[in-house]
Amino acid sequence: MNMLTQELELKKKLLQESTKVLNQQIQAAKEAMDEAQESANEHHGAIEDKFESFREACQIQRDMYARQLDELISTMGLLKRVNATRENREVSLGAVVMTELQNYFIGVSLGELKVEGESFYAISGMSPLYKAMAGKTTGETFVFRDKEYKVLQVF
């Protein structure tokens, strides 16, 4: 297996892990939304005022989870645009960026992912950190929050 194949294999695993994490978040939001809806429905038809305000609280919660779900679904749409079969020569969407401080996967913001025993921070193309490193290539440096990062590898 040549170096590039290994790198693309790692990128594919990062994409799979990102998708898995996002699917879990989507599932959790759906379940929370359904639970809030069920709680509201159970108290439907109760005459007392306190049940009415409880039901309203459940609806508000349901709407909050629904918004969260919408956001997660559009995040998944962005993630689907990441191409794991293409090598990135510079920091851009879909790139894996190794620096001497941390490793990054440019796609969507999911926090820390563990793949093959290594940590990667999944960040979005909207993040200030991404904006600081965008367009950099192997060997170049960038500064973020007063720290200098050296790009060891981009693929």
Image: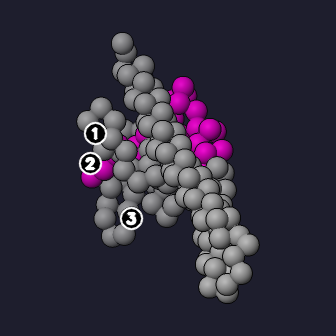
Compare residues 36 and 112 and report the one nearer the observer. 36
Residue extending furthest top? 1
Find residue 46 and report its image quarter.
bottom right
Q: What residue do we see at 65% from left, 70% from top?
A: 43
Q: Residue at x 68, y 64 (%)?
A: 41
> Disc 2 designates what residue?
100
**Magenta stretch holds residue 39:** no
The residue identified by callout 3 is 144
Total numbered circles = 3
Q: Position of residue 85 (x, y in %)?
A: 54, 26
Question: From which residue to which does the magenta span run?
Answer: 75-104
Q: Is residue 36 left or right of residue 98?
A: right
Q: Amino acid at mark 1?
A: Glu
Cβ–Cβ below 8 Å for labels 2 and 3?
Answer: no
From the viewer's perspective, is residue 106 above or below residue 80?
below
Q: Earlier in the sequence, mark 2 or mark 3?
A: 2
Q: Mark 2: give few (<14), some (14-19) or many (20+) Cα within 10 Å.
A: few
Question: Toward which corner of the image does residue 92 lie, by quadrant?
Answer: top right
| Residue 46 appears in the picture as rendered | yes
| Residue 17 in which image quadrant | top left
First of labels 1, 3 by sequence position: 1
* SS under mark 3: strand
As rendered, which of 152 and 129 lies closer to the eye? Answer: 129
The colour scheme of the drawn protein is: one colour
Q: Which residue is mark 1?
A: 118
